[in-house]
Each structure stands twice: as C-alpha cells, then as structure tokens.
Amino acid sequence: MFITKPSTFLSTSISAVSGKVSNLNNELLEYVNPEKPTHDHSSQYYKRFFISKFNLGDTAVEAKFSSPMKITDGDQITVSGYPKGGSFQVLAYNNQTQQVASNENWVVLCLGAAFFLAVAIGLLNSELVAGGALIPKLFLVGFTLVALYMGYRALLIREAIKLLSS
C-alpha cells in the first residue's frame, strides 16, 4: 500500500491510497422514495445506495455510490477521497486489475447547484424577501446552502478524479 500526494482543496484534504482489496463487504442501502407520488406505478419505488467496505493494507475504506463498485477481493485498486471517522471515504476509484475507473457524476451535481442557485437568486429578487417576510428568507438561505454544498461536493469529486489521473 502507498499513499500518493495529498491535495488540499478548501478545508478537505483529498489523497489517494493504493493497494490490494481484502475483507470486501458489499451492502445495499434501500429505502422507500418519499418523493414518489402515490398514483405512480413505476419501478422507481426505492432509492438505492451501494456501500462497499474493504481494507487496502492497513487502511479501512468505505465507498457509497449509486451503482455497485466493480471490485473483488485481491484486486489492485487506487482510491481517492478523504479520511472521515476512522475510515477512508472514496470519491473516485481506479481498478487496475479489471481496468475499470468510476466516480459519481460531478456534472449533475454542478447542474443541480446551478439550479438551486438560480432559485435562490429568484427568491432574492422577489417582493416577499424585500418586504421582510421570514419564510421566504429561510427558503433563500436554504437554497443557497444546498447550492454551495452541491458545488463544493462536485469540486471535491473533480479534484479526486484529477488526483487519480496524475
């Protein structure tokens, strides 16, 4: 196992860890989609997150993706992410054994951030906020915070991808 150069982006230190996968444990987190209308009979009834927990040498690694990671025990992989709560949180990975690289879609996060920012700007220009109403101001703050978080997360994923490719 080796750790490649860390990259500090804002306050989160992104680093890459390489090694052989051992003690692989795949889990599926599935829960009812609260946004699904009751009259909709489509198959998108559950939200799914695929969680993979494994070791790379002495490092405990945890990855949460919307699709399952393509890894098996004994694969040589490089992951990039950040340490959190005693384990390494994966933002992107490159499996050299199976020649597969994957990450969450940072472009969709950027588009979502732009949408929430546009809604916040629209609220900022509304007469309700200018008139001093409390609820529209709370929505303005909420939409702005969501936009900032989504943009920050997209930039972290982008930084993790760049670290893997270097």
Image (spheres, grey):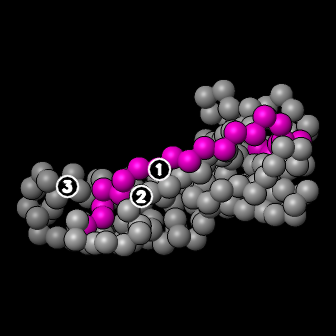
Label 1 Cα neighbours within 10 Å, binned few <14 / some 14-19 / many ≥20:
few
Identify the residue at image location x=60%, y=65%.
106
The answer for how far apart the CA atoms under marks 3 and 1 are is 34 Å
State the extent of the magenta-drawn residues as a range: 15-37
Q: Establish if 26 lies above or below 43.
A: above
Identify the residue at image location x=51%, y=60%.
151
Q: Earlier in the sequence, mark 2 or mark 3?
A: 2
Asked if residue 78 is among those painted magenta in the image, a careful observer would answer no
Q: Which of marks 3 and 1 is nearer the N terminus?
A: 1
Q: What element carries label 3?
A: helix
Residue position marked by numbered label 3 in the rendering:
137
Q: What element carries label 1?
A: strand
Identify the residue at image location x=68%, y=32%.
87
Q: Establish if 73 lies above or below 42.
A: above
Q: Is residue 96 left or right of residue 40?
A: right
Nearest the camera: 77 or 46? Answer: 46
| Residue 38 visible in the current orientation | yes
Which mark identifies residue 30?
1
The answer for how far apart the CA atoms under marks 1 and 2 are is 6 Å
Residue 86 point in image, percent of width and height: 66, 27
- The count of marks equals 3
Quadrant containing the N terminus in the rendered view: top right
Mark 3: which amino acid?
Lys
Label 1 with label 2: CB-CB less than 8 Å: yes
Residue 48 point in image, percent of width and height: 50, 55
Residue position marked by numbered label 2 in the rendering:
46
Nearest the camera: 4 or 77? Answer: 77
Judged by its main secondary structure, the magenta piece is strand
Label 2 Cα neighbours within 10 Å, binned few <14 / some 14-19 / many ≥20:
few
Q: In this view, does 100 lie to the left or right of 64?
A: right
Mark 2: which amino acid?
Tyr
Q: Earlier in the sequence, mark 1 or mark 2?
A: 1
